[in-house]
Amino acid sequence: MPKKYIGRNRADNLDWFVNKWLPDGPPVCFLQGFSGVGKTDLARDLRDAAEGQECWEQAVINEIADRPTPSVIESLMELSATLSRQGLPEMEQVLFEEVNPNLAFGLEKALKRPVLIILDEAQRLFNTDSGSPLPEVNGILSFLRNRQSLPGRLLLLSDRLVENARWSEWIPVRTLTKLEPEEAIEVLENKLLDSAVALEVTLERKLDLVKALDFNPRAIEALVGALAYDSLDEIIGSKPGLWDTRDRVVSREFLDALERDLLERTLTHLEMAHQKRLRRLAVHRRSFKREALEKVCVTKDEAAALRTILITNYLINSRNGLLSLNPIVREIALGHLKEEAAECRQAHSAAADYHLRHFKAKQIVGSQTTLGESFAEVRYHLVQAGREAEIRDIGHRFTDHLRQDITSVSPVPKDPEDLAERIGILSVLLSEGGAKGLRISPRSLLTITRQPWRHRAGSHSRRACYRGRSGGM
């Protein structure tokens, strides 16, 4: 059932999706909107509506992981694993079983059935500067442009405006706007009531508050979370310039600064033990289940208590058993975590154990390729935790798709964490004759050997060059 404060714009969009787009197409659509306005909540309502209609086999939401260097192929492999678990194996069969899989063809195979696929955080597959799609995504969209009769639907959620260009001219774009003033006041009052927080101010004052927060639902939640510990005068008095709404337009950067200030106030009131556990959770690049909480806590009771504290303070969201940190909270927590190298490694180690639970099970249920959803994340956390050797135990299952993602012409990752992961993966998989076919160019080797990990890169390059001469690669 849609939220009570869904708002007129949200109701109109939901009605259009259900009664126009789902039955009539085209197969691809965008939902754009400012971060925090409720795109994911609207998508959940759409998914529920589709599941309630017999004509739709499945409706799934998959989140694109927050990687410094986006990987389209791994994002689609993760999607294929999700679909396979829902009884839709066609896309997985193309991406995992073919030697050189065609990404567009794989997605088309999924959309040949009446299924609704929603990709959350889809802006992560687009260029941050221009807003244009990454080459692989552009190829997929161009391919689907000529497949207008597909029964399936693909909805892309983006917190950035979709570029008005040739590649997007055929795709409908819906915009989820901020709340109307009276709707924002209703959200504020409901959240205050839910949190048992008293705010004795006039209706006019409430209007000023939600206006300062640009009528953004998530920012309003951040205010209520801060009000649980500090008075309104204390909150505004600390940074009055952020709350002055005279003669200004709220920009993305301005609202981020205001929301960050509110969340930082709330974080400082948490017990230090809870703050440390929250920081450890921040290494997760996508939503996680309660088991991830248990990995950073001593007991399940502690994990349950932590979950309650984080949810009631609006620091984490819970959706159908999945938990996700507020993105600004995650950014703040990661900033603190990276200042403590040992604690950062422990956080990645706990996250690695969370993903490794699939691989260490006595009996793996279902197709082993469904583990592809966890492989990208587990290897990332293992490298960051300094546990690269463990990749060997699970890596042999997935080296085929690594050959496609890491080739002689693959660019050297610019992000330090991505570069460390690349070196760690290649060093392990190329050792003892593993992953034959993986190689990097001499220019890439030269670039890598100039990095802080050059002692590992040098060893890797010697093995790569040796195998190149012997014909092993």
Image (cartoon, rainbow, N blue to C red):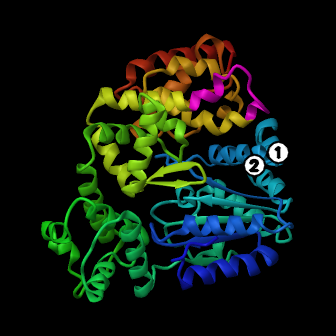
Judge from the rendering whether residue 438 lies leftward or rightward of residue 7; answer left or right: right
Q: Which mark is residue 89?
A: 1
Give 152 or 329, whichever is nearer the viewer. Answer: 329
Q: Nearer the viewer, residue 237 or 393?
A: 237
Q: Which residue is pictured at 62% across the width and 80% down the height?
A: 13
Identify the residue at image location x=62%, y=49%.
72
- Mark 2 lies on residue: 83
Q: Is residue 357 magenta?
A: yes
Which quadrant would the N terminus be assigned to in this image? bottom right
Mark 1 closeness class: few <14, some 14–19, many ≥20 residues within 10 Å: some
Q: Nearer the viewer, residue 105 or 7?
A: 7
Contact, mark 2 vs mark 1 (Cβ under 8 Å): yes
* Magenta span: 355-369
Height in image: 359 above or below 36? above
Residue 316 position, x and y percent, is 43, 53
Q: Is residue 325 left or right of residue 79?
A: left
Q: Is residue 284 left or right of residue 197?
A: right
Residue 450 visible at all: no
Q: Tag 1's secondary structure?
A: loop
Helix, strand or loop status at disc 2: helix
The residue positioned 38% from the left and 75% from the top of the image is 188
Above or below, 170 against 147 in this view is below
**Dot 2 amino acid type:** Leu
Disc 1 marks a residue whose amino acid type is Pro
Q: Position of residue 94 (x, y in %)?
A: 81, 43
Q: Residue at x 45, y 27 (%)?
A: 349
Percent position (x, y) of residue 137?
Answer: 65, 57
